């Protein structure tokens, strides 16, 4: 099935040339994805009926000669923390194993309104808590480049599905790096917009002040297209921003003359793998050759970001996950003699280890006597981290860093020590805390052919410039690698 | 150890979580190590820093709220469809009030 289109442009061309109908493409994509997935385990649920119904709507539209949506016929996958009406949504958790949502998330509605064909729901760390997809309540997903390695997380299923050619685009969610890090590990583009840029209506909340929905794609142009489709104010999400969404795709193709790019030296310190560091430095050279002015900057509070993030995110999670109590969401624990027993046994039996650990940490940080020392302290340090970025963006337009300190690791390699896993998020969580947009774009490979991603960050609502710079970089670095 | 088994049981009670003895021991040690790590935040003097609860971008307050208009909501049977137990249009739970 190597003939399946890998990009949105390729899908559009195939449909326009009548090489195949949208239904034929959906059928081929489903057959290919189901076969490929026996090794990768990226999907929790396939949705052939929904996919074919969407494809038929595209074909009918084509037959009537109507203008097609931006994603007409494009096979996509949705991370299983985003609800889909009538299609099982588990959040990667046993506690929601049989949950069938009664409505669609706004991002899902927007994708389908643009003609996208949803082929299934992807695996993830339980409630998006993790950096490897090993915390799924069902099974781990494997990295398409090396099946003994993790795809990253928490949106590992979505990253692997796009990287393995099972779909053209996928939605993931990013709370502390859960789109950018798996994109880096699998060699795809992955983006998180400004906080509030994409509606979270229908996203199972993990940490509400940090959660984002965003795309995985095989190139930056497709990322711009999907971001354009899913962004914008949504009356159903009061945290979504009433800020106009430019046509991102038309902003691509610019050179980088006059663009100032900051490189924070704190992100190239100890702990950074040598091959990853060298690839990102080469990426910075490429940006310089494209006309960007490279400046050294400082983000002085970077070293406090992991501690800050894991207090705030777990505190918010402990509150958000209180709703899974045995009353409304499908499962009820074995001991339900009294109300309190029902709560305790439902949650004790239904949640996995990482989720319980984070609920415990978050509950502790919010509990009487510790609130000021932990949660409030973390919120104050968050202010300092956000100010670091504000100050930096007075001098530069974009910031470039590594995404992860190391390439994809082996399954089980970091599973024993939760703190070690948390520390691997150091380069991605700072942007999450500040609420600025960021993406991961492939910038090279290790000798073992593992992919390496470069992180690019921008000011609030400056996604257009971010995408344009990433597109220029992608074009140049692809040409360099061909030489 | 700053986290005792008693602390772990207290927090698990607050969180309505049944934990096994093995989980209590493991989480106690891990929480201890994580809380040891986050101690580093105390290196920073934040006495004059305001806490950041949310990313605030330039928006007027009324822009964040939708129009206050009546609109359809989920029918009762649909809202109850995922309930482990329901009846007579309600979620069913164990007895709440003792007589």
Image (cartoon, coloured by chain):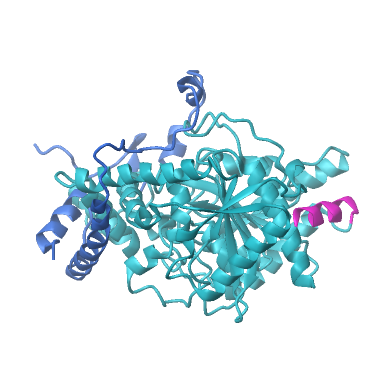
Chain colours: A cyan, B blue
Question: Can residue A170 be seen?
Answer: yes
Where in the figure is residue A69, as x and y percent of width and height? Answer: 76, 41
Q: Which of the 4 image quadrants contains residue A249? A: top right
Quadrant that contains the C terminus of chain A: bottom right
Residue A459, quarter of the rendered image: top right
x, y (%) of residue A178?
A: 49, 57
Side of B31 where A382 appears, left or right: right
Given residues A52 and A72, the one toward you in this image is A72
Q: Quadrant of residue A247?
A: top right
In the figure, A107 relative to B41: above or below? above
Name the residue at 87% across, 38% down.
A64
Q: Which residues are magenta?
A: A6-18
Q: Is residue A142 placed above or below A195 in the rendered structure?
A: below
Q: Residue at x 50, y 71 (%)?
A: A406
| Rendered-image quadrant of the N terminus of chain A | bottom right
- Residue most toward the right? A17
Q: Is residue A32 magenta?
A: no
Q: Image point 67% across, 64% down: which residue?
A: A166
The reply, left or right, for residue A49 in relation to residue A70 is left
Counting from the top left corner in percent of width and height, residue A200 is at 50, 41
């Amino acid at each position: 099935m190597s003939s399946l289109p890998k990009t949105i442009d390729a899908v559009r061309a195939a449909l326009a040339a009548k090489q195949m109908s949208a239904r034929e493409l959906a059928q081929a994509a489903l057959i290919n994805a189901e076969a490929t997935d026996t090794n990768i385990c990226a999907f929790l649920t396939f949705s052939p009926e929904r996919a074919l119904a969407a494809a038929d709507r595209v074909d009918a539209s084509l037959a009537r000669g109507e203008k097609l949506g931006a994603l007409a016929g494009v096979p996509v996958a949705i991370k299983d923390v985003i609800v889909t009406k009538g299609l099982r949504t588990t959040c990667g958790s046993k506690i929601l194993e049989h949950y069938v949502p009664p409505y669609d998330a706004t991002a899902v509605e927007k994708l389908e309104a643009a003609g996208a064909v949803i082929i299934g729901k992807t695996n993830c760390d339980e409630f998006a808590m993790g950096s490897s997809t090993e915390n799924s309540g069902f099974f781990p997903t494997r990295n398409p480049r090396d099946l003994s390695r993790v795809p990253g997380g928490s949106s590992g299923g979505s990253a692997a599905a796009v990287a393995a050619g099972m779909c053209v685009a996928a939605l993931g969610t990013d709370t502390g790096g859960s789109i950018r890090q798996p994109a880096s590990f699998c060699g795809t583009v992955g983006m998180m917009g400004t906080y509030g840029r994409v509606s979270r209506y229908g996203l199972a909340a993990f940490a509400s002040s940090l959660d984002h929905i965003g795309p995985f794609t095989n190139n930056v142009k497709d990322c711009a297209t999907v971001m354009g489709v899913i962004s914008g104010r949504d009356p159903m999400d009061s945290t979504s921003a009433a800020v106009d969404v430019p046509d991102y795709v038309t902003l691509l193709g610019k050179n980088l003359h006059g663009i100032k790019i900051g490189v924070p030296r704190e992100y190239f310190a100890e702990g950074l793998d040598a091959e990853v560091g060298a690839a990102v430095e080469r990426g910075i050279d490429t940006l310089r050759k494209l006309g960007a002015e490279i400046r050294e900057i400082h983000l002085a509070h970077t070293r406090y970001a992991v501690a800050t993030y894991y207090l705030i995110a777990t505190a918010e999670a402990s509150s958000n996950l209180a709703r899974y109590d045995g009353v409304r969401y499908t499962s009820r624990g074995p001991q339900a003699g009294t109300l309190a027993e029902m709560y305790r046994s439902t949650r004790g039996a239904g949640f996995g280890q990482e989720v319980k650990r984070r609920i415990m940490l978050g509950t502790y940080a919010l509990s009487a006597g510790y609130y000021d020392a932990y949660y409030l302290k973390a919120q104050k340090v968050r202010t300092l981290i956000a100010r670091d970025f504000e100050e930096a963006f007075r001098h530069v337009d974009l910031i470039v860093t590594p995404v992860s300190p190391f390439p994809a690791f082996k399954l089980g390699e970091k599973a024993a020590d939760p703190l070690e896993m948390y520390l691997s998020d150091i380069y991605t969580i700072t942007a999450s805390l500040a609420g600025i947009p960021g993406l991961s774009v492939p910038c090279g490979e290790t000798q073992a052919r593992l992919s390496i991603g470069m992180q690019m960050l921008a000011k609030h609502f400056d996604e257009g410039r971010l995408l344009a710079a990433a597109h220029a970089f992608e074009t140049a670095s692809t040409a360099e690698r061909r030489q | 150890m700053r986290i005792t088994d008693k602390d772990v049981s207290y927090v698990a009670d607050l969180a309505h979580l049944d934990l096994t003895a093995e989980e209590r021991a493991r989480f106690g040690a891990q929480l201890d190590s994580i809380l040891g790590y986050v101690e580093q935040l105390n290196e920073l003097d934040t006495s004059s820093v305001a806490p950041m609860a949310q990313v605030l971008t330039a928006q007027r307050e009324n822009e964040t709220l939708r129009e206050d208009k009546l609109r359809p909501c989920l029918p009762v049977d649909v809202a109850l469809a995922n309930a482990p137990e329901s009846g007579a249009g309600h979620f069913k739970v164990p007895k709440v009030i003792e007589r």
